[in-house]
Image (spheres, helix red, strand yellow):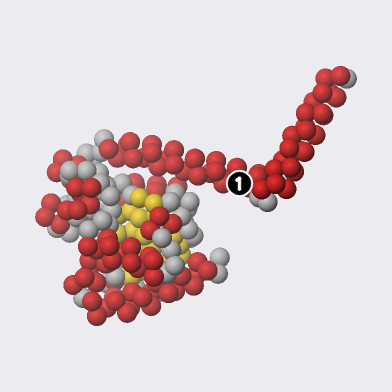
Amino acid sequence: MNEIRRELASIISAVKTRIDLEKRFGVDTITLSKSNSEKERKIKLLEELRGEMLACHKCPLGKTRTNLVFGVGDPMAKLMFVGEAPGRDEDLQGEPFVGRAGQLLTKIIEAIGLKRSDVYIANVLKCRPPGNRNPLPEEIVLCMPYLIKQIETIQPKALCALGTFAAQTLLNTKAPVGTLRGKFHEYKGIPMMVTYHPAYLLRNPNDKAKVWDDMKKVRDFLNEL
Ligand code: SF4
């Protein structure tokens, strides 16, 4: 009986402490701790995946890369960008979208009121194709399971495919990016906008307005969540 009383007293004290914390800090501590542990869980899963990929030599690009380019950003991100493959700068730094195209992507992200650190950015291929050649179909097939796991872990509310390879791979289509862009498609139930790759925009600055139109749709979608 005494034991039950002691147990009850300790539960009541824990509840009082929580109410006191909420009063003092004005936050729902349970929600906060849930979201912290969810973030920790995602970080752990992504780190395990990175470890797996560091040892990956499933395709020949594993031998020629300088660094694995895993992905970067907030594991709790609502918006995830998917590009094509690392270029020279990305291969040297081990981070996606850090060269000129990357700077443009950062501007695009900021244009919709977000910071680069608010989103998650990854590529279809995690190792650089030599000389920045296009990814080969067999390389995409071998590397794709990693991107799928990244998307499953992050569970973004929206995806944005940058350019032909990301769009065609995720949507399993051969349709050109010019006809896919500008509208939401779906990847495994996640709404996915398709737009031009920033590297393409550097060569075709006249199409910047189209990307801005596409990104406004993404911004409006996220604002309505
Ligand atoms: S590109 Fe992908 S499949 Fe090929 S070695 Fe790198 S991580 Fe492995």
Question: Picture coordinates of residue 10 (x, y %)?
Answer: 78, 28
Looking at the picture, tell me which residue is in the foreground, 23 or 203.
23
Q: Residue at x 60, y 42 (%)?
A: 33
Work out which residue is located at the far left of the displayed protein and give it: 131
Question: Picture coordinates of residue 28 (x, y %)?
Answer: 67, 49
Q: Is residue 120 above or below residue 185?
A: above
Q: Is residue 3 left or right of residue 94?
A: right
**From the image, which quarter does the C terminus lie in?**
bottom right
Q: Is residue 173 left or right of residue 199?
A: right
Q: Is residue 126 left or right of residue 44?
A: left
**From the image, which quarter does the N terminus lie in?**
top right
- Write down the quadrant of residue 195 in the picture: bottom left
**Mark 1, residues whose alpha carbon is within 10 Å: few (<14), some, or many (≥20)?**
few
From this viewpoint, is residue 141 visible? Answer: no
Amino acid on which disc 1 is placed: Leu
Question: Picture coordinates of residue 212 (x, y %)?
Answer: 36, 75
Looking at the picture, tell me which residue is in the foreground, 63 or 9.
9
Residue named by callout 1: 32
Q: Is residue 188 left or right of residue 100?
A: right
Question: Picture coordinates of residue 148 (x, y %)?
Answer: 38, 50
Q: Is residue 155 above or below residue 205?
A: above
- Write down the quadrant of residue 214 in the picture: bottom left
